[in-house]
Amino acid sequence: MSSCGNESCIRPADKKCSICSEVYYCSSECQHANWPQHKVSCKVSVVRLRPSGGAYWDKNIPQVPHRERFVEEKLERTHAIFKKGELCPLTEFYGHPILIYCPLIHSKVTDRPMGDNELAVYLRIEPSDGFAPPKWQVHNPGDCFVVRRDKKPLSKDLVQTMFAYHSDLLDWYFEEQMESGHPPGQGIDAADFKRFYKKYWHLGEDSDAEPV
Ligand SMILES: [Zn+2]
Ligand SMILES: [Zn+2]
């Protein structure tokens, strides 16, 4: 067992910092006491969303395999994502609210590489009509980042599932429901997402795996 992250404490520790998972404490009292020191090095886990490579018509730029487009990283707590990141509204419906941030969109760079990042566009869709706001669609956003709103650890598996879920919802919406006027956000809740998660990862119906 690790020793307590509070330097003046010598007790064994088994409670992880819930944000970075890198420091252990014996108690919430010690965690609280150590926070002014720890917050400088406590990093937040984010998932980088990589574009697919070049535009699909440009065969000179190789496509990045889907699975490799989700990359787990750590960012400083002062990173711009925590101030400028936008809520992905659909994710709040099913209980895993994430913020999305695109350095290129926010830097107003106009000379951007070709290709798109449909991962970001799908995650950012509005529940009312299934479209992401124009700024996410008009320009290639390049690499984007997502982070849990509560800053707790975020896995690439969860983000990949979210993308697949949104993609599924949009297929269903545009093929069958648009005429009947049901918005894509209807009928979405934590239970529906959990069902999808299990199906996506081929887990049994009675598996108690929780999306994290
Ligand atoms: Zn302690
Ligand atoms: Zn920490």
Image (tube, rainbow, N blue to C red):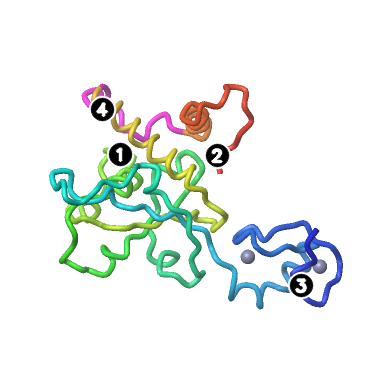
Distance (Cα) linking label 4 and label 3:
56 Å
Crowd class of label 2 (few under 14; some 14 to 19; many from 20; radius 10 Å)? some
Distance (Cα) linking label 2 and label 4:
30 Å
**x and y, in percent, of residue 22 in the image:** 65, 62
Badge nearest the viewer, 4 or 3 = 3
Magenta extent? 176-188
Q: Secondary structure at mark 4?
A: loop
Which residue is under mark 1?
A: 128
Identity of the residue drawn at 48% across and 59% down: 73
Which residue is under mark 3?
A: 6
Which residue is under mark 2?
A: 211
Does the residue at mark 4 contact the one at mark 3 (Cβ under 8 Å)? Answer: no
| For residue 27, side relative to residue 112 (left or right) | right
Mark 3: is the Cβ under 8 angstroms from ligand 1? yes
Q: Secondary structure at mark 1?
A: loop
- N-terminal of the pair, mark 2 or mark 4, is 4
Depth check: 81 or 161 in front? 161
Identity of the residue drawn at 26% across and 38% down: 129
- N-terminal of the pair, mark 4 or mark 3, is 3
Distance (Cα) linking label 1 and label 4:
10 Å
- N-terminal of the pair, mark 1 or mark 4, is 1
Name the residue type under label 3. Asn
